[in-house]
């Protein structure tokens, strides 16, 4: 069995170019004890991914010739890890590839009884919606009449945080990096 990967070939200078990446094929590695082979089904394409293309990035710098970093949902194809079985859906660091072998301890089994596995990504997922919700409701304990200031308000987490704070009855002040992003916040969101 072969897997396909989207890898970073060079660190971009300015705007990301097609030549900065490549699609490669290689054999799926053998499983060791406590590892799981996954078929990648869905990826969450989050803003932090682009930051990993910069040297010294907050989320770490991507390695050249390695799959582009992305969280996602995968389906267990084969398992040498107790508690994960063929067919189980899991959340974890899938990377931009068709298949991945990971230690089972890096994965979180996803309950599909009420929602499809992909619902754990994007605005409802850990990296965006849950982060915004936790910050506004759990940590900030925002109440009607509060004033909330959200930095990076035009970003994925920030735009969710603004909307959650408004739904809590707060007055929201959003900070964004430039006129176009501010217009987006005022006119569209």
Image (cartoon, grey):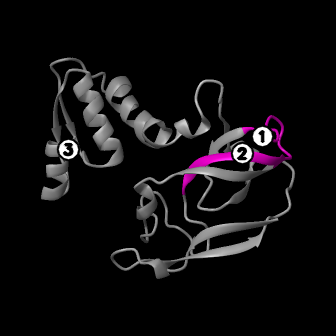
Q: Secondary structure at mark 3?
A: helix
Marked residue nearer the N-terminal end (2 or 3): 2
Residue 130 quadrant: top left
**Label 2 element class:** strand
**Label 2 neighbour load within 10 Å: few <14, some 14-19, many 20+:** many
Q: Which mark is residue 188?
A: 3
| Residue 154 is a magenta residue | no
Tell me if 29 is positioned left or right of 52 in this view: right
Rendered image quadrant of residue 180 = bottom left
Residue at 40% over, 30% down: 134
Q: Residue at x 31, y 21 (%)?
A: 141
Q: Position of residue 103 (x, y in %)?
A: 75, 50
Q: Quadrant of the C terminus?
A: top left
**Residue toward you, 104 or 114:** 114
Residue 57 coordinates in the image, percent (x, y): 42, 64
Q: Which residue is mark 1?
A: 87
Up-down: is 50 above or below 173? below
Helix, strand, or loop for circle 1? loop
Q: Which mark is residue 75?
A: 2
Q: Which residues are magenta?
A: 70-88
133 sits left or right of 100 in the view: left
Q: Name the quarter where the N terminus is drawn.
A: bottom right
Question: Does residue 137 sit above or below 30 in this rendering?
Answer: above
């Amino acid at each position: 069995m072969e897997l396909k990967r989207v890898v970073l070939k060079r660190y971009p200078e300015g705007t990301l170019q097609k030549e900065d990446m490549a699609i490669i094929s290689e054999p799926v590695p053998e499983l060791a004890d406590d590892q799981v082979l996954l078929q990648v089904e869905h990826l969450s394409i989050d803003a932090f991914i682009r930051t990993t293309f910069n040297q010294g990035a907050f989320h770490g710098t991507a390695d050249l010739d390695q799959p582009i970093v992305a969280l996602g949902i995968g389906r267990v194809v084969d398992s040498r890890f107790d508690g994960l079985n063929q067919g189980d859906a899991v959340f974890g660091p899938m990377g931009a590839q068709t298949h991945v072998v990971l230690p089972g301890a890096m994965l979180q089994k996803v309950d599909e009884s009420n929602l499809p596995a992909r619902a754990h990504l994007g605005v409802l997922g850990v990296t965006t919606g849950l982060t915004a919700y936790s910050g506004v409701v759990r940590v900030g304990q925002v109440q009607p009449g509060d004033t909330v200031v959200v930095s990076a308000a035009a970003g994925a987490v920030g735009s969710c945080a603004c909307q959650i704070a408004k739904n809590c009855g707060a007055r929201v002040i959003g900070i964004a990096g430039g006129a176009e992003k501010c217009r987006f916040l005022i006119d569209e969101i």
